[in-house]
Amino acid sequence: MGKLIAIRHGQSTWNAENRFTGWVDVDLSEKGVDEAEKSGKLIKELNIDFDMCFTSYLKRAINTLEIILEVLGKKYKYTKNWELNERHYGALTGLNKAEIKKKLGEEQFRKYRRSWNIPPPSLEKDSEYSSRNDKLYKELKKIPDTESLKDTYNRVVPFYEKNIEKYIKSEKNIIISAHGNTIRALGKKIFNISDKNINLLEIPTGNPLVIDFDNSGKILGKRYLDQSRKKDIITNT
C-alpha cells in the first residue's frame, strides 16, 4: 500500500494579512512555522519512511517541507517543481480579499476565487508582483499572468501523472508540500470531483492529508492527521 501525503504550506505572512498571494514568494508566518512543526510531529507518528518528496518553487512550501523533514530527523532529497506552484491570481495579486469582495460584490468575487474556469483579469507585465523577471523562472517559456483553477489543473495533474502516480502504484510513500489550489487540483483528479462541486473542496493550511492507495491506484482511505482542523473531503460529486 502506498501513501500520498499532501500538505498545504503553513500559514504565510500574506495569508495572515488576508491577501491574494499566488506566485509571489512570501514566507511563513510564526503561526505557519508552528503549523509546519506540528505537521511534522503528526507525520512522525505514522512511523513510515518516504521514497520521494516534492514541492513548488515557492519558499512557503519549501520551508514547510524542510521543517517537516527536520522534525522527522530525515535528510530526504526533494525536488522543486514550478508545476506545483499556487494558482496565479492575476490582477488580484497582493490585494486584500475583504476589500476586493466589497468592491466586486459577492458573486463576482466568488467566481474569481472559487470557480472552475474563470480567471481574474491579467496581472500587468510590469507589475512589481510579476514573475517575468524572476530568475527562478528564466527557463520557463510561458509564465502566466493569470490562471483559473482549470489552468492550474492543466499543469498540476500532468506533472502528477508523469512523475508521481507511477510511484504510488508501486507502493511508494510520497510527500507533496504545496498550496491550496495545487492540492485542490490534485483532489479533483484523485477524488473524481465534478467541475461544479470543486469549489466545495477546502484545503486547510498546515494539516497533512493522507491518502492510501492500492497498487492499481484505487483509494483505500483518506484522512487529515489533525482532526481538530479537518475539512470535508469531497469525493465523486
Image (cartoon, rainbow, N blue to C red):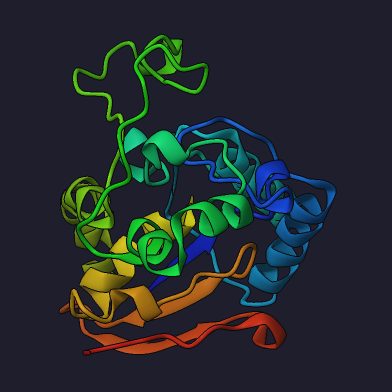
Question: Could one spot residue 206 in this view of the protein?
Answer: yes
Q: Which residue shows up at 17% across the image and 56% down it? A: 161
Camera-nearest residue between 19 and 28: 19
Q: Which residue shows up at 49% across the image and 37% down it? A: 93
Camera-nearest residue between 19 and 60: 19
Looking at the image, is 232 positioned above or below residue 151? below
Q: Indicate the position of residue 135 as horizontal and vertical percent values.
A: 43, 10
Q: Indicate the position of residue 196 as horizontal and vertical percent values.
A: 21, 79
- Left or right placement of residue 196 versus residue 76 in this view: left
- Left or right placement of residue 123 versus residue 38 in this view: left
Count of numbered circles in the view: 0
- Left or right placement of residue 6 versus residue 237 in this view: right
Question: Could one spot residue 172 in this view of the protein?
Answer: no
- Left or right placement of residue 10 versus residue 191 in this view: right
Q: Which residue shows up at 21% across the image and 45% down it? A: 155
Q: Indicate the position of residue 56 as horizontal and vertical percent values.
A: 44, 39
Q: Indicate the position of residue 27 as horizontal and vertical percent values.
A: 68, 36
Camera-nearest residue between 9 and 131: 131
The image quarter containing residue 221 is bottom left
Quarter of the figure that contains the C terminus? bottom left
Camera-nearest residue between 33 and 134: 134
Quarter of the figure that contains the N terminus? bottom left
Q: Which residue shows up at 76% across the image and 65% down it? A: 38
